[in-house]
Image (tube, helix red, strand yellow):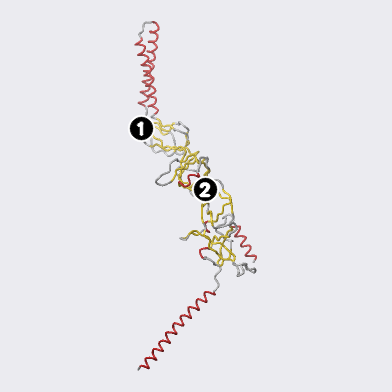
Amino acid sequence: MIKRLLIAIVLLALIAGGIVGFNLFRDNAIEQFFANMPAQTMTVSTVTVEKNKWNPTIEAIGTVNAIRGVDLTVEANGIVTEVLFSANQKVAKDELLLQLDDRVQQADLEAQRTQTELNKTTLKRAQQLQERGVGSNVTLDEARAAATASEAQVEKLQAVLEQRQLRAPFAGTIGIARIDDGQYLTPGTIVATLQDLNTMRADFTVPEQQLGYLKIDGPIRVTVNDQDMEFAGKIVGIDPKIDPSSRLVSVRAEIANPEGRLTPGQFARVKVELPEEDGIIAVPQTALITSLYGDHVFAVREVKDKDGASAEAEKKLEARQVFVTVGRRVNGDVEIIKGLESGDIVITAGQNRLSNGTPVKVDNKVNPAADPAESPAENEAGKAEADAK
């Protein structure tokens, strides 16, 4: 019985040892296979880093308004007797736009003018009697006061009569009429909007950190509704107070609008143009990768042999991770403050499949970082080269 038990134990130990040995052999074989398997070469697009001129800008969003624009209202109660304008009509300063019923005021003014003429005649007679020595000073003073009061009353009634009319406070383009003939109006009722569209203004805000870059008469460019056309202007006002709740400062710029392409109330993208800088290293934003460990790019490096020299027959390239310090961003480019030097080759496309040391092959026939205007020519050149091969 003991002999059989020993035999069973020995057999079990042999089987267990064989299984463990097989697993160790298999894991070692797999490790050796992957260790000796050549890494796949990835195709990437690149740009060569150079120190160039930098045109920094401050980008902001704002609203376009007319340099002068008001909602026209009436000053007195009354019934509309005549509307003298049409929508989008260009009107001159002091042009009559609306007439209210003024028959009562006209009658009062005419009566007062008659009374004024009578008072003037009475004053003249009192002066003549005074000169003859038969009139009293009291009579003359009363006549003079009555004549002066009558003239003042005429001016008052004339002003009341003018309140029955609505005139353009400045030259501009008038909007759609919001009233009709025969409608009873009260003070404050909006009749129409009047906008001076020859010159526009753009109101926008910038962070307080950028306040020091702004100056009066500084140039700006405005784009509206994602149009390709830009409108030039200049800064005319900078609010001296920063909003403590948002930490933003309000800025106003003037924009010439001779063709009337800008409309009040439009959403605007504003670029404040700053002085040009030289010797700045910048790369396309597509080259920059942001992670929890910091901002980095992949640079192309030649693979060196054991002696430290590159292979003579065929240069082998690999991707190397380079951590960088970034600065400003303008027009799809990002400023590199630290980490890159002139002559470095930076990968702009295909880096999502890369890791440190991945073999790469450069193909710039289709480069998302290149100028779109140059891409078709480059693509045609690439096709011609492929056809020749």
Residue 143 is left or right of residue 249, and the answer is left
* Pointer 2 or 1: first along the chain: 2
Image quarter of the N terminus: bottom left
Residue 96 is left or right of residue 341, and the answer is left
**Which residue in the structure is indicated by mark 2?**
57
> Is residue 51 at all visible to an observer of this figure?
yes
Nearest to the eye among marks 2 and 1: give it: 2
> Is residue 257 at all visible to an observer of this figure?
no
Residue 169 x, y percent position in the rendering: 44, 33
- Amino acid residing under circle 2: Thr
For the residue carrying disc 2, how many other residues have a C-alpha within 10 Å: few (<14), some (14-19), or many (20+)? many
Q: Quadrant of residue 78?
A: top left
Residue 31 x, y percent position in the rendering: 50, 76
Image vertical order of residue 287 relative to residue 127, above or below: below
- Taking depth in this image into account, of 130 and 203 the one nearest to the observer is 203
Distance of label 2 from label 1 (alpha carbons)? 55 Å
Residue 54 x, y percent position in the rendering: 56, 50
For the residue carrying disc 1, how many other residues have a C-alpha within 10 Å: few (<14), some (14-19), or many (20+)? some
Image quarter of the C terminus: bottom right
- Amino acid residing under circle 1: Ile
Secondary element under disc 1, as helix, strand or loop, is strand
**Which residue in the structure is indicated by mark 1?**
79
Q: Residue at the spot x=38%, y=18% of the render?
A: 148
